[in-house]
Amino acid sequence: MIDFDVLTGPALREGIERIGVGVVARDASGRVIGMRSTVDPDVWDMPDGTVEHGESPFDAALREAREELGLDLAAENPQALQRRLVAVIHTQADADHPVPAAGYVFDGGTLTAEQQARIRLDPAEHTEFRFETTHDWRHHMTPTRYQRLRQVLRAHRSGVPLYWSAPPPTATTSRSSCSSSPTARAGC
């Protein structure tokens, strides 16, 4: 039997990463939303965050979109939002992150022009948002972040969920492993 008090006790809590979630939301042209970080203006991200106690990853993704965009995607796009998993991302521990981390990315649907006009960012987290094509996001991200985004958006377009696992920092490979289907793996 697993002793959950030991697994979640104060001595271990500091070293345990939370589960991350993200949402891919698009405009009518298929461009993807990104938001500029207030803390680090060089960082652009999709709506994302962490799962809180008692939440499913999907519910956490909807909550994060509500908090970061000011839109309730489930209420506004119920027919478009079908709990579609786009990707599972796993990263190994490294100098910046002492434990491995995992995250889920879900489809956030297509935002109408009216919904886009109602986006309200939390100024403590983001200073601006924009919609860009996959290709254009390369100008706003590090090569590593852009490569991961490309793989997530490829999975989004194909409808086949992606499993992305970054190798440990000591690995001799220079690329992360990814797979979603035999044909999609060729571009990894």
Image (tube, grey):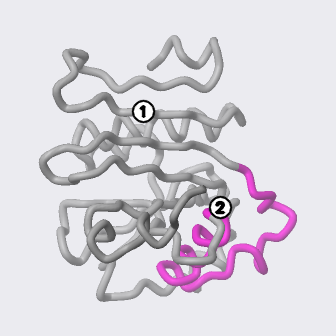
Mark 1 Cα shell of 10 Å, populated few (<14), some (14-19), many (≥20): some
Q: Nearer the viewer, residue 64 or 4?
A: 4
Amino acid bearing label 1: Ser
The main secondary structure of the magenta stretch is helix
Identified at 75% across, 74% down, the residue is 74
Identified at 78% across, 70% down, the residue is 77
Mark 2 — residue?
108
**Relative height, residue 85 to residue 159 (above, below):** below
Residue 186, position in %: x, y? 51, 11
Query: Which element type, helix, strand or loop, lies under badge 2?
Result: strand
In the rendered structure, which disc, 2 or 1, sits on the residue that comes first in sequence? Answer: 2
Q: Nearer the viewer, residue 16 or 135?
A: 16
Residue 27, position in %: x, y? 61, 60
Identified at 61% across, 63% down, the residue is 57
Query: Which element type, helix, strand or loop, lies under badge 1?
Result: strand
Mark 1 — residue?
165
CB atoms at circles 2 and 1 under 8 Å apart?
Answer: no
**Relative height, residue 95 to residue 76 (above, below):** above
Residue 182 horizontal side relative to residue 12, left or right: right
In this rendering, which labeled residue sits more in front, label 2 or label 1?
A: 1
59 part of magenta stretch: yes
Mark 2 Cα shell of 10 Å, populated few (<14), some (14-19), many (≥20): many
**Relative height, residue 88 to residue 80 (above, below):** above
Question: Residues in magenta?
Answer: 57-84
Residue 145, position in %: x, y? 31, 43
**Quadrant in the picture for residue 110:** bottom right
Residue 103 horizontal side relative to residue 175, left or right: right
